[in-house]
Amino acid sequence: MRDYHIAVIPGDGIGQEVTPEGVRVLDAVGELTSAYKMRYEYFPWGCEYYLKTGRMMAEDGLKILRDFDAIYFGAVGFPSVPDHISLRGLRLPICQGFEQYVCQRPSFLLPGIKSPLADKKPGDIDFVVIRENTEGEYAGAGGRAHRGLPIEVAVETSVFTRVGVERVIRYAYQLARTRRKKLVNATKSNAQQHSLTFWDEIFVEVGKEFPDVQTERVLIDALAARFVLRPESLDVVVASNLFGDILTDLGGAICGSLGVAASGNINPEREYPSMFEPVHGSAPDIFGKGIANPIAMIWCGAMMLEWLGEKPAADLILRAIQAVTAEGKALTPDLGGTAKTRDVTDAIIAQARRIAARV
Ligand code: IPM
Ligand code: MG
């Protein structure tokens, strides 16, 4: 029985509602498989913490998190705190400080879930977006001057480094190699003549190491259209930080709901802990109602297990999620159902038990 030390940061809004559900599934599957036991440590960081302390996380937060095996993260952001403060005070320092330069976001149409795209069946949508996660448009370089004057100016400069671009693109090629061997480079080098031509050149350079991977260079606007018109043509997509951000909301939406979109902020070298968090964010509009969809958070748990080397346990969770959506009884309102957050988790755990008993 392996033992993992997990830092849990429920964060804000529905992060607080879905995180305990994910933990319940991790524990249940640990017992069912007798493969691992989780030791959790909880951190109350987020907007409420900020209103009390003036900080989004403890001052030595990164030092505290450094030695955990992984971080299980709910969501950050609430109307009580400006978004740029909450993001730059918690999630970004962790992603950037821990070199989690890969943000891996699967889009997979679950059985029983209706895509807003006509006539899509499970299996028609099955791709992964690899989003650069430490620099690019989120680098934070820039400033504002002459505030309030007619000559007021704001500058936000994207930062692309050779190391930063190369490493995320290499990861995407490696991932494509384990899948259907097709990689799309999301770019806009026609307009971004310095940064993204650089990005494109590196895409071609790194590609020489992967002659078996079929590549395409697609402009981001055309790619957005293709997500809607021909998602079945996609396998792995590599994108800059902001492009990847936008594409993955779209990826979640075409799979029926952002409530099923999982994400991993990964440090591939394993020098630092990686962090698993759903794409959906804190959803203040439905917070407190008990109707948040826990599937994305539970799926993040599966991604975390896979990252920790617990593939059979991760597969069990994914199969249980699929059994529940295929059955279509325990679905939250975002998926057209009437179930509560807890009902969905209960159903997933029951299915995991059933599947585990069969093998
Ligand atoms: C995401 C989110 C964040 C981002 C927000 C909360 C700042 O949209 O994880 O996709 O833009 O990275
Ligand atoms: Mg986003």
Image: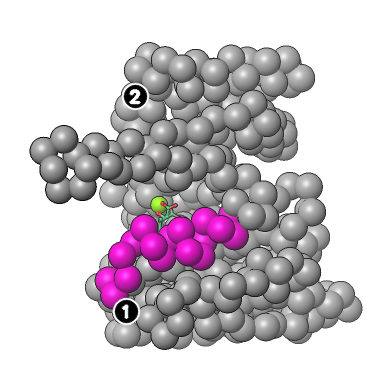
Of the residues tagged 2 and 1, which is closer to the observer?
A: 1
Report the front residue among 186 and 271. 271
Query: Which quadrant, please, contains the N terminus?
Result: bottom right
The residue wearing badge 1 is 287
To which residue does mark 2 refer?
222
- Residue 273, numbered label: none
> What is the three-letter code of the residue carrying label 1?
Phe
Residue at 67% in and 55% down: 98
In the image, is residue 128 above or below residue 355?
A: above
Residue 94 colored in magenta in the image:
yes
Q: Residue at x 84, y 77 (%)?
A: 3
Q: Position of residue 78 (x, y in %)?
A: 33, 72
Determine whether label 2 and label 1 are within 8 Å by CB. no
Q: Quadrant of the C terminus?
A: bottom right
Residue 355 in the image: state x and y as whole percent. 67, 73
Position of residue 116 measured from the top left corner of the image (x, y, whole percent): 28, 49
Residue 169 vs residue 243: left or right? Answer: right
Q: Amino acid at mark 2?
A: Ala
Q: Secondary structure at mark 1?
A: loop
